[in-house]
Image (cartoon, rainbow, N blue to C red):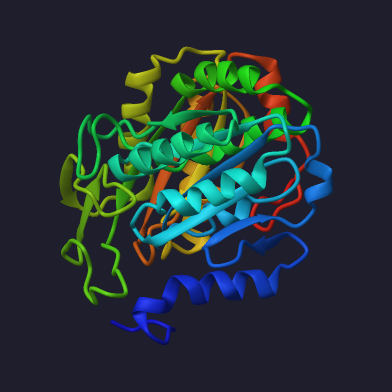
Amino acid sequence: MKKIMNDPQNIVPEMVAGLVQAYPQYVERLPETEALVRHDKASMAGKVGVISGGGSGHEPTHAGFVGAGMLSAAVAGQVFTSPTPDQLYAAIKAADHGKGVFMVIKNYSGDVMNFDMAKDMADLDDIKVKSIVVDDDIAVENSTYTQGRRGVAGTIFMHKIIGAAADQGASLDELEALAKKVMPNIKTIAVALSGATVPEVGKPGFGLADDEIEYGVGIHGEPGYRKEKLQPSKALVTELLGRLKDEFKYQAGDHFAVLINGMGATPLMEQYVFTNDALNQLAADDINVDFTKVGNYMTSLDMAGISLTLFKLEDDAWLKGLQYPVDTIAWTQK
């Protein structure tokens, strides 16, 4: 294992400290926590706070999306481990400006349990909290750490839509209703070329031969649905889009947003090759792609691989939400 670090046990607090020092115009750290909140607190007055969080190792998720138009706060757990309820509660208190707090939670047992415990703590302080559990991964129904489908890169689209609505003054109830409508329309599937190495473990969480890939892996290295020999980009796209088409049953003329996400060790060159093939195949099916993002948005440490997210735009307002201006570390608005 070769990693740029000091003590593996301190890698998360040192990462958080470095991020805050690099971007003080965006975020600040709540004392004695790994919770990061927006620096511009005054601009959140009169609005619902939006928080998220999860295990570290998925950077820039979640702290990279804290800022105007997206998240009010994010909490970093240990690597691939949910944040603790007390730190989540600290983020809820910091994000509440009298209108309540909405939580975006990826569907992992530890995350769901700890966010729920934090909500119970907030209830005792009369802070209104609602949430959505993101379960966009179509690869497998149940997997390690999960009852039901996993929450993966489609979470970023949920951050964007809910953050935009909150910034425009939507109420807590309105955000909950919006999230429930959006969630069934976001679906993701991935392919891995190599496993991820957790710093404290020192070796990849799973192994693949030099000429082998695995379809459907999770962002913590959870098993997928099939291994096979490495295929050209066009064949990878055909497999992943085929699965997504079966889920959506999309038809000519449908409108989608597309997120092509690197898993941590996949060069942008390869991501753009995959993007070219994916957009060409969607065009061949007469699918309208109204919004596209390509890059590393929800990674898995040093895993080589890529995920493909489709978001069916059944409401014109959802596209406007994706296009809504933001000011964060990791979301570049074009």
- In the current view of this chain or complex, which residue is farthest to the bottom? 6
Residue 107 as seen in the image, left or right of residue 41? left
Q: Residue sitting at 59 percent across and 19 percent down?
A: 178
Q: Residue sitting at 34 percent across and 36 percent down?
A: 240
**Where is residue 202 shown, x and y percent of the image?**
24, 77
**Where is residue 122 shown, x and y percent of the image?**
53, 37
- In the current view of this chain or complex, which residue is farthest to the front? 124
**Where is residue 131 shown, x and y percent of the image?**
50, 29
* Rendering quarter of residue 26: bottom right
Front position in the image: 75 or 151:
75
For residue 87, say whether it is visible: yes
Front position in the image: 318 or 125:
125
**Where is residue 184 shown, x and y percent of the image?**
44, 19
Q: Residue sitting at 60 percent across and 75 percent down?
A: 18
Front position in the image: 76 or 292:
76
For residue 154, say whether it is visible: no
Front position in the image: 100 or 73:
100
Query: The N terminus is located in which quarter?
Result: bottom left
Residue 235 as seen in the image, left or right of residue 315? left
- In the current view of this chain or complex, which residue is farthest to the right? 42
